[in-house]
Amino acid sequence: VASNVNITNLNPFGARSVYDWRNLRLIYDKLVRLSVDVEPTPWAATGWDVVDDTTIDVTLREGMEFHDGMPVTVEDVKFSYEAFMSLPDSYFAAFVQPIESVELIGGNVIRFNMEYAYAPFITTTLTQIPILPKHIWEGVEDYTQYYNEHPVGSGPFEFVRFRNGEELVATKYEDYFHPVNIDGFIFKIYASPEGVLTDLELGVVDMVSYDLIPSHI
């Protein structure tokens, strides 16, 4: 995949660009993902129950693992949401602002208590907040300043390497619960749109990550 925009941050708490998140959202998983018809689809969650206007129970899928082999638990989900709730200036601040508290009510269920009714909670909040490994992040003093040199998530692709200004490489996570139809991807970074066009014409890359400039179209 070719891009003439560099990746600036591999830290989910520090990433503020759609270019960063195009890769991070493949490495880190979400409770819900949107289908091609923009319908919320259970993902890392098997489903949800709207108890009332300000209470939503979400059931975590069993048997998932982070890329380092550690299990994904409700504690990881609770930690992830509360961590983003503690950062009022984060990229996802607006999505977690309506949440008053997150609690575990037994089994694999996470309860979200809302300060007020928030209609897009399923389609925005649950589809955006990444599930982070608590065992890695709980010891970090400043979430936003952590370099996160080797991102560990539970998504469909496992991080391999990143060379600033050159490429990000990820491979299919073999133990992912959902079929993944490619072996991996290389996100190639170019200094100019001309480099992107040249390698697209030569077949060095399969696709571009963003629109071509008008003259190249």
Image (cartoon, grey):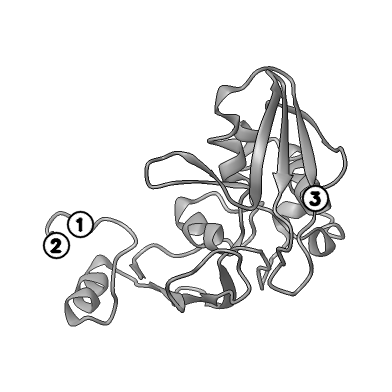
Residue 145 vs 47, above or below: the answer is below
Estimate the x, y position of residue 159 in percent, counting from the top left: 59, 74
Q: What kind of residue is marked 1?
A: Ile
SS category of the residue bearing label 2:
loop
Q: Name the residue under label 3.
A: 74
Q: Mark 2 points at which residue?
A: 216
Residue 89 visible in image? no
Instruction: From the viewer's perspective, tell me whether residue 217 is left or right of residue 208.
Output: left
User: Looking at the image, which residue is at 66% across and 64% down?
Assistant: 153
SS category of the residue bearing label 1:
loop
Quarter of the image with the C terminus in it:
bottom left
User: Looking at the image, which residue is at 31% across and 57% down?
Assistant: 210
Say which mark, if any, is on residue 213. Answer: 1
Estimate the x, y position of residue 184 in percent, counting from the top left: 47, 76
Say which mark, if any, is on residue 119. Answer: none
SS category of the residue bearing label 3:
helix
Q: Which of marks 1 and 3 is nearer the N terminus?
A: 3
Q: What kind of residue is marked 3?
A: Val
Q: Earlier in the sequence, mark 2 or mark 3?
A: 3
Determine crowd level at label 2: few under 14, some 14-19, many 20+ residues with C-alpha closer than 10 A.
few
User: Looking at the image, which residue is at 53% across and 62% down?
Assistant: 26
Residues under numbered marks 1 and 3 in contact, where contact means CB atoms less than 8 Å apart: no
Q: What kind of residue is marked 2?
A: His
Residue 160 vs 128, above or below: the answer is below
| Mark 2 vs mark 3, CA separation in Å | 48 Å
In this orientation, which residue lies closer to the viewer: 161 or 14?
A: 161
Estimate the x, y position of residue 146 in percent, counting from the top left: 73, 61
Estimate the x, y position of residue 11 in percent, counting from the top left: 64, 59
In this orientation, which residue lies closer to the viewer: 9 or 76?
A: 76
Quadrant in the rendering for residue 138? bottom right
Instruction: From the viewer's perspective, tell me whether residue 205 is left or right of residue 122.
Output: left
Residue 74 visible in image? yes
